[in-house]
Amino acid sequence: MKTSALLAGLAVLALVMASPSHSYPSSLGPTGILNVPTAAATSPGSFEMMLAYDRPVVAGETIPVFPVATLNYGFNYGEIGVSYFDVNGYTAVKSVHAKVLLAKECEKSPSLAVGVIHMKGDTAETDLYLVASDSMGLMDFFQRHLGVDIKVSGGMLYQKPNQSVHHRALKDNLTGMAGIELGTPGQTTLGLDYIVEDIAAGNTFGAILRQPLSPDLAGQIGVGSGTRYFFGITMKFGGK
């Protein structure tokens, strides 16, 4: 089945079932959509744990990644977390990430967050990102997200250790990212995101459908550029 058909099916299903969004870890760990982090975070005092299978396509090559395991902890002004990726055929990658919420959404301005992701496998990579999220007055159904990511050091996740960002111009290490989410907290949600000219993967599109199975458990299914597939389970515990 073509990716476009899958995306259309996910969109129709979400619009029928959904009646914005609960926070979930992205494929790289920080709370977000499939690929793009957002200005949302794990609830203060709570943990979110995700176990997933990912199959991204990088430079035309399909790379199975299992397990993808993430544990995030929320505090009053953001979240911290750790992730583990078993990149089949290449390396095991360990990651730490943190996000700080700079401002909450109000009538005339979006919520803002800044974050860092540091990954270590055969090579190391550090990313900094800034993201803005807002609901355009549709708090109960719609969220949009815009951001920028800069790779400040190292090679690339899901990539053979033969490239580095050290000798690239600063502008060449900047990546734009955007996304939208449809749905209400505690119900089915659909997220769509897009990354512009990622160094490793080029222009990257993703879609993820999330379905709560209980108040603290949710299933996720995603598709992306090429023949990418993503399946995951997220569990929330702790907090009030």
Image: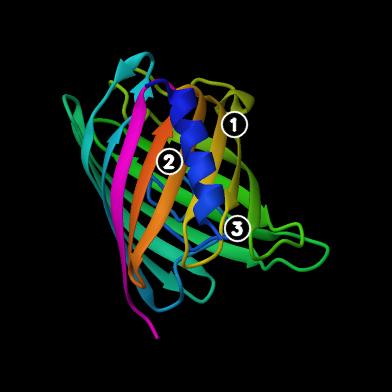
Residue marked by disc 1: 174
State which region is magenta. 225-240
Circle 1 packing at 10 Å, graded few (<14), some (14-19), many (20+), is many
> Does the magenta-highlighted stretch encompass residue 127?
no
The answer to whether residue 46 shows anywhere in this view is yes
Closer to us: mark 3 or mark 1? 3
Q: What residue is rendered at 56% in x and 49% in y?
A: 15
Amino acid tagged 3: Ala
**Quarter in which the C terminus is drawn:** bottom left
How far apart are labels 1 and 2 at the CA level? Answer: 13 Å
Direction from residue 69 to residue 211 in the image, left or right = right
Q: Is residue 208 above or below residue 157?
A: below
Q: Position of residue 82 (x, y in %)?
A: 31, 56
Q: What residue is rendered at 56% in x and 46% in y?
A: 129
Q: Which of the labelled discs sits on residue 61, or is there none?
A: none
> Does the magenta-highlighted stretch encompass residue 232?
yes
Among numbered discs 1 and 2, the one appearing first in the sequence:
2
